[in-house]
Amino acid sequence: MNGFSFRRFRAVLRKEWLQIRRDYFTLRMIVLLPVLQLFLFGYAINTNPKHLPTGLITADHSQDERTLIAALQNTGYYNIIPLDSEAQGEQGLADGSLLFVVNIPPDFDRLVDRGDKPAILVDADATDPSAIGNATAALAGLSNVLDRDLPPNLRSQPAVTPFQVVVHARYNPEALTVLNVVPGLICIVLIFSTLFVTTLAITRETERGTMENLLAMPLRPAEVMLAKVVPYIVIGYVQVAIIMTIAVVVFGLPVRGSVLLVALALGLFITSNLLLGVTISTIARNQMQAIQMAMFVLMPSFILSGFLFPFKGMPVWAQWIGQIFPVTHALRVMRSVLLKGDGFVAIWPQLWPIILFIVVIGVVAVKAYRETLD
Amino acid sequence: MSETLVIDARDLHKTYGARKVVDGLTLAVTPGQICGFLGANGSGKTTTIRMLCGLVKPDSGGGTCLGMDILTDAQKIRRQIGYMTQRFSFYDDLTVTENLEFVAEVYDMANPSQAVAGILERMSLGDRADQLAGELSGGWKQRLALAACVLHKPKLLLLDEPTSGVDAKARREFWDLIHDMAGEGLTVLVSTHYMDEAARCSRIVYLSEGKLVVQGTPDEVVQSSKLITYVATGANLDATAVKLRSMPGVESAAVFGAQMHIAGMDRAALEQAKTSPTGAALTWHEVPPMLEDVFIHLLSESKT
């Protein structure tokens, strides 16, 4: 009689389902929130920004200069704004209205023609390196733009190197940020929408006074916990379907691997979040505490997962912490299955940590469930 | 002897922080009894009830409930008792029927829908069957809670202030139901603040600061108090009561309509109060104390 009873589990499950169905506000949030977040983040996050405001200081307006400026603009990264003085450039960089100031020395054409190799000074606002990174890298390609207009002896010589380096930008040749962001975004949106629903599951019973009754009934912790998690797995899959559809249709996300594999990984991921939520809910004394604890978990998993910042760029200890969170692994699975078309064998190293997390947190949840009011 | 007791708790102790909520309480309840649990707010009634159904672990002491150990067999005890919490603890967003069906399933009843139909009929809840519990008035909520507690045919009912905030008619009907069920052999432990309810109990247990102060039938409790009560009639009762209250030996002076009760333990002091200038204007005669006089007396005693 102390074992798990399917009938009691089903009774709680039915009760939960009725309550969810009657809570229209939460139901709407469950559908709207992921959609809203996906659009918001999907359009807002861009790690390869273009058309950056660039001030230009020049004395001559010569022909070579015009060629150079046209080339700058053609990279797509620079939006040229002519300036009158260096002071104006300083001011622009300081107040943030300019990210670059290009300073072309006087007599540029003559110096070039004489082979004096004049220096063009580019001041960049490096307070946000990722914003200017790709733009500065594009400058390297400008060295030979004047070749057409120069006498042959001054043209840039192709470097003679003993070997060649060929870089292939695999899986995302155009380096579109959206392809990097959206698979991860799916995970982040899911963690928001699933962690919170169960975070409040037990504390709500406590605050409404129904917990005392629930405890006084012959219910086992596992029956209550599971019944509170299962409905949201179903809802989680509805969310996944909505998010994936938007990601593919609106953001052009490719699905190169198996959809079933995506479903499996996300199912595990959702379950891990829900169980984590239930655990928080049993430990917290009230809903306020529960939300604070959820935020405490959410922030590191958001930042250390590799969603916004490159995982390999973090110190080793931070990587270790990041590895604990299911979101880190779910994110990798999504990127590798969706973008690379990887199969089960390739993603297994990311799946088992999620499964381990589920088992551990499940045990913690059942142990933490207080069967008395003490 | 102890096999026949439904509740047999010995020397229960429970401390929250520095406060002794239950302090060496011993309680024995025989089958078919309606045992009234009385005492001021915070005297340990709720905690005791929770200890009996295993929701709170006593710091020390122990005992049996329906012959099962309250420390180790809480799970088994829970299937055979009905516990009605002080605060309504069913689901506001479920209908009456859905709440009851939930309870029937959780208690693993053989025929849930039949049991639910039966209890709806018995509690006259039929008309409200499809109403959300949250939309019910206080009296109907309480009736639903009672229905849910007795649905699985428990042998012992623990009711924690079941009638607080319920109107007089609903209270009367509620107690009629409890007496019906006690007649069928159910044992009931009910905490209350209402004296008319205490009078309807077959036995009263009075707690103060976690200790049992007095127990017995209502008559026994009244007699054992040795309280002396006088009734006065006359003019200006309210003003007089205020003055009398401050006199030595007068423990209480309360006006009930056209009468005033004064009570105390010291006959000589009371006589003095009667004959004092304020009391002399009234007509006096001695009466046996009412249950309420006794409890006011016990309450004021516990405060000093």
Image (tube, rainbow, N blue to C red):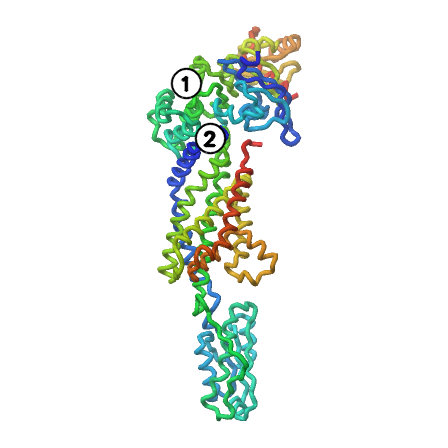
Residue wearing tag 2 = B89
Q: Does residue A108 appear anywhere in the picture?
A: yes
In the foreground, A150 or A324: A324
Q: To which quarter of the image does residue B218 belong?
A: top right
Q: To which quarter of the image does residue B108 belong?
A: top left
Residue wearing tag 1 = B173
Count of numbered badges drawn on the protein: 2
Q: Chain of mark 2?
A: B
Is A148 placed above or below B277 here?
Answer: below
Q: To which quarter of the image does residue B206 belong?
A: top right
Is A42 placed above or below B56 here?
Answer: below
Q: Does residue B240 appear anywhere in the picture?
A: no
In the foreground, A16 or A315: A315
Tag 1: residue type?
A: Glu
Horizontal and vertical percent position of residue A172: 44, 66
Tag 2: residue type?
A: Ser
Which quarter of the image is occupied by the N terminus of chain B? top right
Q: Secondary structure at mark 2?
A: loop
Q: Chain of mark 1?
A: B
Q: Secondary structure at mark 1?
A: helix
Q: Sequence order check: which comes first, mark 1 or mark 2?
A: 2
Which quarter of the image is occupied by the C terminus of chain B? top right
